[in-house]
Image: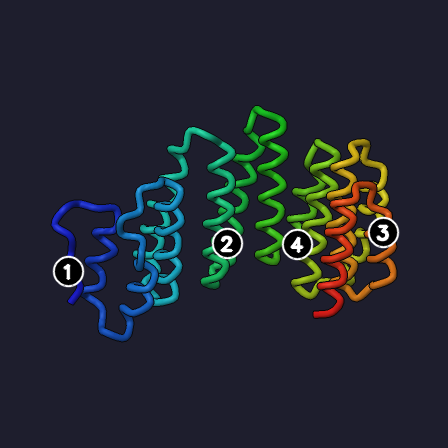
Amino acid sequence: MTEVPKNKGLFEEEIELLTKESEETKKPLEKALEGKREVSDEEDKALALAEISGVMMEMGRVEKAKSILQKSLKITKDFSLDYRRVLTLGDIAGILTEHGEKEIARKIFKKALKSARTISDSMKKNLALKELAKAMAENKEEQRAVKVAKSISNRSIRVNSLIEVASIMIENGKESEADEFLDEILKKARDLADKADRATALRKGSVALAKMGQEERAFEIAKNIPIKSSRDLALHEVTEEITR
């Protein structure tokens, strides 16, 4: 039987649940709690609780899972930085998607997006939206991810975000959809004023093309990257992707 710590702790209630489960059903809960009982960082606490909630959902303990999820979301409300809240909510949504709770994840993504829109610092807002678009794409919410990426006001961050989303779409098996707007994005990448930003975007774009098996185009873009270090890295990544 799992011992309940004498001192009050964040996961005391969750640990107590183990004593009420059979040996078979408590294994996934024990795994979810593994290494998390001494967590002190607030972000890690929120993510750990989301993981436990996901496990409880899979076990059919829906009401308890929802209660634990609310604990997780409550922690994010107390974050002093909106940027941090957005990223953590995106991660929580990702965890729930992994456990099959896509509808709940969608609602949390919506909450994260609403929070991102309130960030007053323009650069932080754009970076938060970029990370949120990435998280949505990784969780197969590709069309929403594209929409969020397109809403980024900074041109360089927007272009890099769209290329990143396109690359994830390819990994998700959505090559045709990604190919539809990748050409347009790469044209915009070539027009970026900042040389370093242009190099980064073109490098990511060349690798995305390589993932789709478009070797000639991938190498053509990689060879024309304006910064040598980025060009060399792109050529290496494209070659590596093609030879997989």
- Please name the colour scheme applied to the rendered image: rainbow
The tag on residue 3 is 1
Disc 4 to disc 2: CB gap under 8 Å: no
- Where residue 50 sits: x, y (%)? 39, 52
- In three-dimensional space, the C-alpha distance between marks 2 and 3, rounded to whole angstroms, equals 36 Å
- The amino acid at mark 1 is Glu
Horizontal side, residue 218 vs residue 19: left or right: right
Amino acid type at circle 4 is: Glu
Farthest top residue in view: 120
Q: Name the residue under label 4.
A: 142
Q: Residue at x 84, y 57 (%)?
A: 219
Q: Is mark 2 on a helix, strand or loop?
A: helix
Which is more N-terminal, label 3 or label 2?
Answer: 2
Give how far apart the Cα atoms at labels 4 and 2 are: 13 Å
Q: Distance between the residues labelled 4 and 1?
A: 44 Å
* Circle 3: element type: helix
Q: 84 or 221, which is in the foreground?
A: 221
Q: Where is residue 40 in the image (x, y as percent from the top left)?
A: 31, 42
| Tag shown at residue 223 | 3
Mark before the other along the chain sequence, 1 or 3? 1
